[in-house]
Amino acid sequence: MEILCLDLEGVLIPEIWQAVAERTQIEELLKTTRDIPDYDELMQSRMRLSAEHDLSMSLIEEVIGTMDPLPGAEDFLTWARSRFQIAIISDTFYQFAMPLVAKLGGPLLLCHRLEVKNDRIVGYRLRQPDPKRMSVRSFKSLNYRVLAAGDSYNDVSMLQEADEGFFYQAPANVKADFPQFPAADDYAALQRLLEAARKRLQATI
């Protein structure tokens, strides 16, 4: 049995912090793991900016409420569900992602938790160290063959651990740093890569 592990933001939904940046005009919030590979460094920057600008959780939730999955994402997941088990493995937070995951039909989501007090984000808890790699490793320990797709530096450990890994709409700098991963720029191309990988894996049974 194959399981498909997908990143969420940039693969199935828009980047949430970038949407907040556009709403608040806080330009530094536009940065993602495509720009800052160290996730803790990125989140510390976001926490600092949120405190400096007194961003409320309510405002962020309001922004999220206006967002929808990326065009074509729902059709892609319908296609994928007919061939794989699906797991979304993300460095986002349950408080952010659940409304958008519901719009995708509620696939399994493995991510982190925010600490919120008085309507302000005061911290965050990672699910575990190196969570994307460890999630794939755990699925493999259950005798799943794992395919994975992501768009950024923080997805690399997931792609490395998977039986086959792919970039989806990754920027040029990320693809240049990790040329070993085939890349797709639209869902049709990703489907072709995944279907070919599925056949290769099934041929090894």
Image: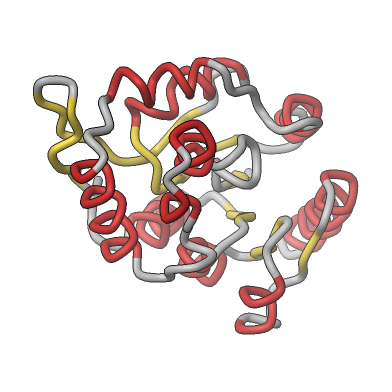
- Image side of residue 130 versus residue 164, left or right: left
Please name whichever residue, 113 or 83, is drawn nearer the observer in this view of the structure: 113
* x then y, percent, for residue 34: 54, 64
* x then y, percent, for residue 73: 73, 32
Residue at x-position 73% and y-position 60% = 201
Residue at x-position 56% and y-position 17% = 66
| Extreme residue toward the left, this view | 117
Please name whichever residue, 18 or 160, is drawn nearer the observer in this view of the structure: 18
Residue at x-position 47% and y-position 41% = 25
Image quadrant assignment for residue 72: top right
* x then y, percent, for residue 96: 39, 28
* x then y, percent, for residue 118: 10, 20
Please name whichever residue, 171 or 166, is drawn nearer the observer in this view of the structure: 171
- Image side of residue 10 versus residue 135, left or right: right
Quarter that holds the C terminus? bottom right
- Please state the total of marks drawn on the protein image: 0
Residue at x-position 23% and y-position 48% = 47
- Image side of residue 114 versus residue 108, left or right: left
Please name whichever residue, 101 or 107, is drawn nearer the observer in this view of the structure: 101
Give the image's coloring scheme.
Answer: secondary structure
Judge whether 73 appears above or below 102 on screen: below
- Image side of residue 64 versus residue 75, left or right: left
